[in-house]
Image (cartoon, helix red, strand yellow):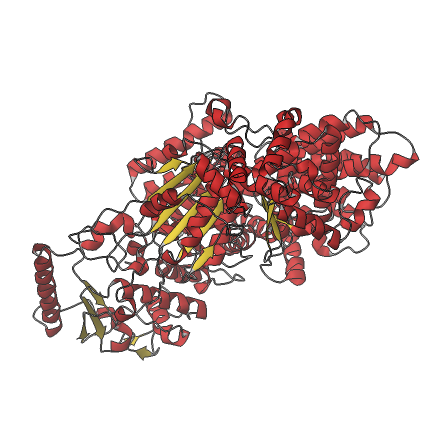
Amino acid sequence: MNLLHQQATDFRPLWRSIAGAIFLGTPHTQSNDPINWQNAGAILRLHSKSKNARIPPTAEIAKRLAKISLSFEQAFDLIPVLSAYETKQTRIGGFLSSKAVLVGPEFAKTNVRYETPVPIDADHDKISCLKIGSTELNSICKFLDETIRQALVRIRRPSDDYVIPAALDQKTVADDEPNELEAVSYASEISKDATHGSTSLGFDIIPLVSDFSVERNDPLLPCYIMPPHPRNRAFFGRTEVLREIRERLLPKKSDKDGIEVDDDGYEIEPTPAMFALCGPGGIGKTQVATEFAHTSKDCYDAIFWLQADEYSKLSQGYTDIAIKLGLVLEDSVDARDPVVVQELVKGWLVNPLKTYKQQEDHQFAGESALARWLLVFDNVDDPNILDDFWPLDYTGTGAVLITSRDPLAKRYIYSEDEPGIILPPFTVKEATDFLLKLTHRESESKNETDAGTAVAERLGGLPLALTQMAGVIERRDLSFAEFLRIFNEEEDVRSKFFKMQIGNGSMRSSRYQHTLDTVWALEKLNKSSSILLDVLSVLDPDGIPEQILTGSMTELDEANITDEYPRTIEGYQDARTELLRSSLIARDRGANRITIHRLVQDGARAKMSDTRFEQVFALTSKLLYAAWPFEDFSFGHRINRWSKCAELFPHVVQLHGFSVRWKNMIADRRRVTETDVEFPKLLVDLGRFNHQRGNSSESTRYLETAMDIYKILQNRSETGPLNEDINNTIKRMVAEIHHDLGCIATETNQPNTALNHFIAFNKAMIEFADGEPQTKDMSLGVSWNELGNAYMMNGEWNSAADCFLRSMETLKQLENFRKVDLSFPQINLGFSYWLQGRLNEADEILSDILAAREEAYGINDRESFMTGKLLHAYGNVKASQGKLTESFEYHIRGLQQYKSTIGGNHHRTADLCVKVSDHYGRLGQYDTAMSLLDQALKIYGEREYYGPEKARALCKKGKLLAVVDKLEESRAYMSQAQVLYRKLKSKEDTHDATDADFDDLIVFWSK
C-alpha cells in the first residue's frame, strides 16, 4: 500500500476506490528497537523451509520497518481498518522448539483513527482459517457491511473527494521498485541455499534494491538560495513589470491542503505559474528578477536561484538545492550523482511536502501542508536546456521565473499561453530620472537636467549602460554636458571599442546599434584594476572564487608574465575596490566570490589587442594551474579531490573556450615557455577528472585540445640544454593524453581505438624508463596494465595476461611498494584467467588481492571503485565454479561498493545490477530481478557506446517476462534486443542472437 501512495499521481483513482482494509496477523509498530521486531523475524522463520534458520532483525531493518509503519499510519488515518490478532501461541522452529504469540493486540494495532481490533482464537498459522458462523467471522462480516455502507453514502453525497495524505503523495527516484518487506522474504531463501564456507546474507540484502530510491528526510524549510549578486538598493522603476510578475507568480488563495480552488470552493486543475522576462543583454532582466525574489521572499517557503546558461551549472545548482534542502547529505555519493539529485529535487518540487512525519491536525490548522516555492532560471540562452530540470506534474504550489536574451523563450516554456514580456528599455523620462537618481543630481538646474536627458537618450535607455555611465560620471566628477562631449567626440574609438551583438543578426534591435560603445570607459582604469578585470573576463561569470585570483600571486614574478597584476592582498583589494566602485563587478563577501556581467566581460575582451589577450590568457592559465588540485599520475580514481575540481571546473572550461585564439598566437612564437606547457597540462587533468566522474565522451575535447597545443609546442620548441626539461615534459604529457584517450575508449566500447592509444602510451613509457628499474614512478606499470586491458577488449586473452604480469613485476620495483599497488593488474589478470577457463588460478589471485585490500582499507572500502570491480570478477569466478551462493554474495557486495563510490547511476553499477538480477531470477524472485534490470536499462539510457550492455539487459528482461507469462511484453523486449544486436554487428544477420552472442559484444569487466 505504501508503494501505491509513493506513486499516487499515477494511481489516484485506485486510491480513491479503497473503502477499507482488513489485516490478519500483520505486524505493525513505530518502534526502532530490533527487540520489538523479533516476532517479524520469527514469522519469516516460520515460513522458511529451514525452520531452524535464525533471522534476527538488525537495527537498520528495524528502522526501515518502523518507517514503513509510520508511512502507513499517515496514509490510512481516515480509512476504516480491521486489525485481527491471534490469541494462541505458535510453535517456532522444529520439534520441541519454543512457542509464542507472534502478533498480539499491541503488535497488530495500526493506530489509525477508525481501527477495529478483532481477536482470533487461533495461532498465526491458522489465523485466516475461520469457521462459518464463528464470532470472529461475524465480526469481520459486520465490519465489511458497515464499511461498504459508508462508502456508498460518500459516493452519493456531493462532497469533496478524499485527498491522499501529503506525506505519501510523492514519486520516488526509481520506478517500479520492490518495497523493503518484499526484500526481507528473500533473506531466508538465500540463507537456506548457502554452501559450506559462504556467508549467509540474512537481512543485509534488503537495501540492495530499495536503496535505489533515496531515503526521504524532512526538507529544511524555509530554504533560500538567493541571487549570487546582492540586491540593488538603487533599483528603479519597472513598477508595471513587477506588478505583472506578482499577479502571475504570487501564490493564489487556496484551501488548507494547498489546492487552488475557485470562488465556490471547487478544486481547480493545478497549472504551473510561469513568467519569462526576455530582452537583450543589459536591459535589466536579472535586476528585475532579483528585485522580485527579494521583495516576495515572505510569500514563499523556498526560493531557488539558478544560473541557466549552461547545463553543467544547472546540474550543480540542483545539487546545491538538494543539499541545502536536506534531500541529500553534502559529499555523499548521491550528492555527487547529478541524475539522482535532479530527480530528487524535481520530485520535491512536484510534491513539496513540508514534513513527512505525522503531525496533529491542530498543528496545520489553516496552514498548507505543501511548501510554496519559487524557481528562477537566470540567463536561459537556450530554453531547450531546461528539459531535464523542469518539474512536470505540478501540484500548483510553485512558480517559475525565467530570464533570457531569446525573445522566443516565452514560447518554449511549458505553458499553453505565452506568459511573459520582452522587457523594454527605459523611456527617455524614466532613463533621465534614473540617471539623476544614480548621480544624486535630482535638484540640479534645468540646464543640467536637460543635459542628463541628452545622455539618457544617447545611451538608448539601457539600464546597465546608464548604471555604468553614472559611475564614470561620478568618479571623474563630470557634468552631463562634459561627459556627452567626450563621449561623442571619441567616435573612432567608440566604433571599435565595444560592439555588442544581442542574439543573432536577425534578432538584433536597431535601436541598440550604438549602445554600450565605450560606456564603461574601461581604458580609464588603473593598470592593476584593468588587468584584474581582463582576467575576470575569461573566467566563468557566475561566482569566481577569490582564491583563484589571490592564491598564487607570489609565483607570478617567476612566470614573468606581467608586472601589472597585484602581487599582494592589499594591492588586489585596491584593484577590486575600483572595479566595485564603478559597478563593473559585484562581490559576495560571505562566500568570497566575484560576479561579473557577461556584457562587461565581452567589453573587456573586445578591447584586448592580440598581445594583451595572450598576456591575459597566460596569466589566467597560471592562476588556475596553481589553484587546481593535481594528483600524481597513477591508476587514479580517488574521489577525495572531486569537490575542489568541481568548483574550478567551469572556470577552466571557460578559458578553454578562448584557446583557439591563443593557439594561433603561440604557433607564430619562436620560444616555448613553461607557462605554455602548463595550460594543456591543466586541460589533461580536467579531462581526466571529468572522465572519472562518468562524463567520458565530453572529456575528449579537452584532451584533444591539449594534444593540439603540445604538437604546436613540439614544432616550435628550441633544442638544447635550456629546453630539455620542457621537451621531456611535452613528451610525457603527450603520452599521458594517449593514456586518457585510451581509457575513454575502453569505457565507451572502442576496442581498436583503445589498443592504438595504449600501444603509444606503453611505447613512450618504455622509452622514458630506458631499461632502468622504476622505483619512484608507476607509469610504466600502469602502461602495461592498460595495454593488457586493450588486448582484453580485443579478445586476446593470452597477450593480455602477459601484460598484466609485466605490470605486476614493474610495480614491485617501487621503493614504497605495497601489495595493494598490484590491485588493478591483478584484478584484470583474474578476469583474463576466468575467460580462459583457468578457474583455480583466477580464484587464487583474486582471493589474494581481496585479502590485501581488506587488510589495507577494511572490508568493502570506499577508497575507489577498484574493490567493486574485484568483487565483480570474483563473483564471476565463483559462478563458473558452480558456487552460486558465494557468487551471489560477492556480486551483491560489489554492487553496494559501486553505489558507495561511483554512485547508483554509473554504467559499472548497471553491469552489476544485471549480474545480481541473474541470481534473483535463478532463485525465482522475478520482481526483484526485473527491478534490477529496469535500473540497469535506465542507467544505460540511449548512449550508443553502451549498446552491447543495453542489448544484453533487454534480452534478459524479455526472457524474465516470458517466465512470468507476459508473452506479448516478452516478445517486444526480445525484438528490441535482436534489432540492437544486428545494428551493433553492422551486418545483416537473420539468426536469433543467443546469450553468448550478446556477451561476446561486451567488454570484459562488464561480463
**Considering depth in this image, is 138 or 374 the residue closer to the camera?**
374
| Vertical arrangement, residue 524 with respect to residue 928, above or below | above
Q: Is residue 826 visible?
A: no
Q: How many marks on residues?
A: 0
Residue 409: quarter of image: top left
Q: Position of residue 379 (x, y in %)?
A: 49, 39
Left or right of 604, for residue 294: left
Rendered residue at 41%/68% (across/down): 63
Left or right of 843, for residue 428: left
Q: Position of residue 315 (x, y in %)?
A: 50, 45
Q: Position of residue 34 (x, y in %)?
A: 41, 73
Q: Position of residue 840 (x, y in %)?
A: 62, 50
Image quarter where the N terminus lies is: bottom left
**Considering depth in this image, is 495 or 307 the residue closer to the camera?**
495
| Vertical arrangement, residue 378 with respect to residue 93, above or below | above
Rendered residue at 39%/54% (across/down): 296
Residue furthest out toward the top = 988
| Vertical arrangement, residue 108 with respect to residue 454, above or below | below
| Vertical arrangement, residue 117 with respect to residue 898, above or below | below
